[in-house]
Image (spheres, rainbow, N blue to C red):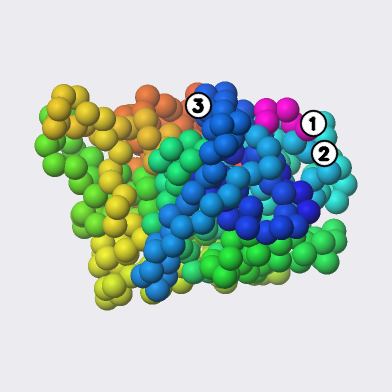
């Protein structure tokens, strides 16, 4: 089976190496970012083999090695003979990859977003138009691991495994057997963990979004009110999370719960019961790796999968740092995470004061404009995956094809 893997970053490195362990699976990487693509291609030409160091759930450490079959920037080559196309690329690149693939989309393709960042389904609907109706589209709630690539095409590491990942179809599958076989193939590639489960519509994945809750909230908690002076100690992103960030995270999660309640009231046929509050979400996907489960605060600060992750910083001079507001924690998880959630809230008439204060702060430090006087009317809204920017204007349009 041939799998197309869109992306060339942390997750793509790990997935391509894991997949190489399956003799009947070939992975072709479509990379639209020239510097990484050419360096990875050169590494393979020189005979380098990608190695991934794994910190396993039982505390042991192992290493695996393997390369993808090919790396290309040609979508025609990449899509030839493909059964499954996996998006494992930053959300801000989704639109470009969808546009590049669209001429080569064939009926029966399985499209998997891993993760399916909030609003992924609206981008597919907007760009693939009628073709989407002949494609089985599945989105999963998160990347399977906490991982990092350290040397392009040569070295990556898994710091922690998610234990369970839930996914959902964009529509009732056109071919249930093909979808089940595709998920089984992905499971073989990933290994025993995380366990992949198909539970609800992709709208549930947009609501069950880990990064959109965690990253902007903790950035806000750490840097709201920052005096602009460089710091000399590098804070850990999760292990040093403060009470403000955790409280904002919980408040945002509660607002998502309110959106779910509004959807359930208006569309009782939809099953969104597995959209978890953030505390339950973390316990589900990281259960054995969380050492203190008394509260959300202790859980975030004791998750060993997160222990090596630092705040994104820029060094101004040796030993002194300032926050990097250009990191994906804001430049991706606001426009492709919290903004589409805010758009869903508008359609369901749900107030979101916690989201609003994070968005207003984030757009100030990143130089963007999404909210204007509390309304989704900013000049940069069009570049997000907000449902309104993709032509969704009615609550009933939030779901399915």
What segment carries the magenta color? 72-77
Say which quarter of the image contains residue 387. Answer: top right
> Marks 2 and 1, Cα distance to the nearest angstrom?
6 Å
For residue 200, say whether it is visible.
Answer: no
> Residue 200, how many percent across, how many down?
66, 65
Q: Would residue 222 be seen by someone viewing this image from the given angle?
A: yes
Which of the pair 399/394 is nearer the observer? Answer: 399
Work out whether mark 1 precedes mark 3 in sequence or the reverse, and give the earlier one.
1
- The residue where tag 1 is placed is 76
Tell me if label 1 and label 3 are in contact, CB under 8 Å: no
- Total labels: the figure holds 3
Along the line of sight, the residue nearer the viewer: 336 or 388: 336
Instruction: Decide if residue 31 is on the left or right side of residue 247.
Output: right
Q: Do callouts 2 and 1 mark residues in contact (Cβ within 8 Å)?
A: yes
Residue assigned mark 2: 80
Q: Which mark is residue 354?
A: none
For marks 3 and 2, give the CA distance: 36 Å
Q: For mark 2, does the 10 Å Cα neighbourhood hold few (<14), some (14 to 19), or many (20 or more) residues?
A: few
Badge 1: how crowded within 10 Å, few (<14), some, or many (20+)? some
Depicted 197 relative to depicted 239: above or below: below
In depth, the one of 221 and 50 nearer the eye is: 50
Label 3 belongs to which residue?
380
* Mark 1 vs mark 3, CA separation in Å: 32 Å
Question: At 49% from the left edge and 49% from the top edge, which residue is drawn?
Answer: 51
Say which element carries label 3: loop
Q: Disc 1 or disc 3, which is closer to the eye?
A: 1
Would you place residue 39 above or below residue 263 in this image?
above
């Amino acid at each position: 089976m041939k799998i197309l893997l869109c992306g060339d970053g942390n997750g793509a490195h790990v997935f391509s190496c894991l997949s190489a362990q399956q003799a009947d699976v070939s992975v072709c990487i479509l990379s639209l970012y020239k510097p990484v693509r050419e360096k990875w291609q050169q590494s393979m030409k020189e005979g380098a083999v990608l190695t991934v160091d794994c910190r396993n759930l039982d505390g042991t450490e192992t290493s695996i090695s393997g390369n993808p079959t090919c790396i290309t920037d040609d979508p025609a080559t990449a899509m030839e003979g493909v059964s499954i196309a996996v998006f494992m690329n930053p959300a801000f690149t989704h639109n470009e990859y969808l546009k590049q693939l669209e001429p080569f989309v064939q009926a029966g393709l399985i499209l998997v977003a891993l993760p399916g960042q909030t609003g992924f389904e609206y981008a597919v609907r907007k760009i693939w138009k009628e073709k989407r109706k002949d494609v089985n589209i599945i989105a999963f709630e998160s990347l399977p691991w906490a991982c990092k690539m350290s040397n392009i095409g040569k070295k990556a590491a898994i710091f922690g495994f998610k234990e369970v990942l839930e996914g959902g179809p964009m529509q009732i599958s056109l071919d249930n057997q093909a979808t089940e076989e595709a998920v089984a193939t992905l499971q073989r590639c990933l290994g025993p963990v995380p366990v992949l489960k198909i539970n609800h519509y992709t709208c549930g994945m947009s609501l069950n979004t880990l990064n959109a809750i965690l990253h902007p909230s903790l950035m806000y908690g750490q840097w709201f009110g920052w005096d602009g002076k460089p710091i000399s100690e590098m804070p850990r992103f999760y292990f040093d999370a403060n009470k403000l960030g955790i409280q904002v995270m919980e408040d945002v999660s509660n607002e998502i719960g309110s959106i779910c309640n509004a959807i359930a009231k208006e569309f009782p046929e939809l099953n969104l019961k597995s959209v978890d509050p953030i505390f339950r979400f973390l316990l589900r996907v990281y259960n054995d790796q969380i050492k203190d489960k008394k509260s959300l605060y202790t859980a975030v600060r004791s998750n060993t999968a997160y222990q090596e992750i630092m705040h994104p910083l820029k060094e101004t001079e040796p030993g002194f740092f300032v926050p990097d507001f250009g990191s994906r924690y804001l430049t991706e998880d606001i426009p492709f995470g919290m903004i589409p959630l805010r758009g869903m809230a508008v359609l369901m008439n749900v107030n979101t004061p916690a989201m609003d204060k994070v968005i207003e702060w984030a757009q100030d430090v990143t130089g963007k404009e999404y909210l204007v006087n509390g309304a989704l009317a900013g000049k940069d809204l069009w570049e997000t995956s907000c449902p309104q920017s993709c032509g969704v204007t009615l609550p009933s349009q939030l779901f399915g094809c």
